[in-house]
Amino acid sequence: MRNTPLLETPEPAGRPRMSRRRRKRLAIVISLSLVTALLLGVAAVAFALNRVDRSIVRSEIVLPQVEEIVPEAGEQNLLIMGMDSRLDQNGDPLPEGVYEALQAGNADDGGYNANVLMFLHIPEDRSKTVGFSIPRDNYVEIPGAPLGVTHTKIKEAYGLAMQEKMNELSWGEEELSESEIYQQARAAGRQAQIETVSHFLGDVRIDHFVEMTMGGFFHVAEAVAPVSVCLNQATEDYYSGARFEAGLQEIDAQQAISFVRQRRDTGFDGPYLTDLDRSRRQQAFMIALADKLRQKSTLMNPKTVWSLVNTTQKHVALDSEFDVLGFVGVAHDVAQSGVEFITLPIVGFENVNGADVNIVDVAEVQAIVASVLDGSYFDAPPASGGDDAVDGGSDGIDGADEADTFDENGEPIAADPAADPAAGRAPEAAPGTAHYDSWEEPIRAGSIPCVN
């Protein structure tokens, strides 16, 4: 019997038929090209990290309670400091366009206060990394009493010690350049800030620190934007330039600056916000940033990588023992497992020597920190209704404190018990989000937090 050949679908007119062998060769070429591009991307990242490791600003710091450097594979306590200065790490002004984006004045504004203080505890098994915010206006003891100041806002330890060191070096016998005096003074500020935080938290160990300028934050946000954040209510603020709708949304770098700086609402019917809500905003952005960096495409983009490298060189300072390359794996593990955040509590507000400060119960703070470090903090039963606050789209609980809002003069305002806590809130929670109505509620890992 003759074999009848199968009919083949004719190729469209004018298009030459590609042989099977040629298609195979083309597939191999494409595969090799993709693998080569991937390897080049990895090599570029490695090269960029090496460049950062060699050129970044570092300080010889005596790390509190550190007898020997713990290998990066072990437990790590990291202090993140965000500076109020509108200058780079060399004391030079930022580009004019950056000042316009920051909407926070110019090179003459700000100072050397550590306006953002976050302590990150990374356990050895990376199972539950916990970060907590230290409110910047907490009235605390300052070890060493720089410039004779024994107690003040925790954020001011840096600037006091820096000024004291500059005075000492400027009038000293050693001939130093302005740049040398400036960098040595910055190192003294870092040392004082780290010691102050460690002492306040219960003389805890701090393995490393990361310091970033305001301009650095903008450039990081610019490199990875857009990032996803979620707000419980629509809000606007003339001072920070904030103008946000309620619900889940993507924001660019300029909006990110407004998002983390906003501490009041100047609209007609917006939410009451305080400096403690600003700490919660900063936590929400850190979670959004970790989520963006967890995406492989983010760090395989050469433009993103080099932007982050340039930002790090100009706007970040580390301790001399910080191994950038070694920490990449740690950061990857942390991003995969997620981070949970808390804000350390305050007792109330007072005016001390003309300054509005947060009064704290040091024993209570240190007990919370100890429970975070031993892993028992999140094992405790949640407060009434606390589970609802993290149930991927529930309305959460109204955890607002009566003294948690302020008028234009900074005076506490009692909350209106008749007010609807859900007024202005997005009608439905987006999938994968969780509502947090108060800065007092711990943020759990695994969802995008909707905050005030």
Image: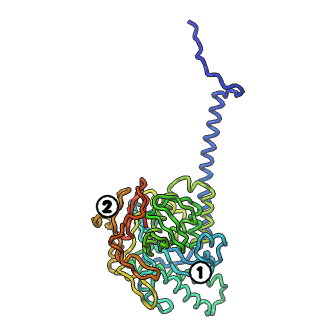
Vertical placement of residue 297 versus 214, above or below: above
Q: Quick one: SS at disc 2?
A: helix
Crowdedness near tag 2: few (<14), some (14–19) or many (≥20) residues, C-alpha within 10 Å: few
Q: In this view, does 359 lie to the left or right of 326?
A: left
Question: Residue at the right extreme?
Answer: 14
Q: Which amino acid does label 1 sit on?
A: Asp
Quarter where residue 170 is shown: bottom right
Q: Quick one: SS at disc 1?
A: loop
Q: In which quarter of the image is the C terminus?
A: bottom left
Q: Distance between the residues labelled 1 and 2?
A: 43 Å
The residue drawn where x is 58% and y is 16% is 6
Choose between 207 and 420: the one closer to the eye: 420
Residue 361's spot in the image, x, y percent?
A: 34, 81
Residue corresponding to mark 2:
387
The disc placed on residue 109 is 1
Tell me, yes or no, if residue 85 can be seen here: yes
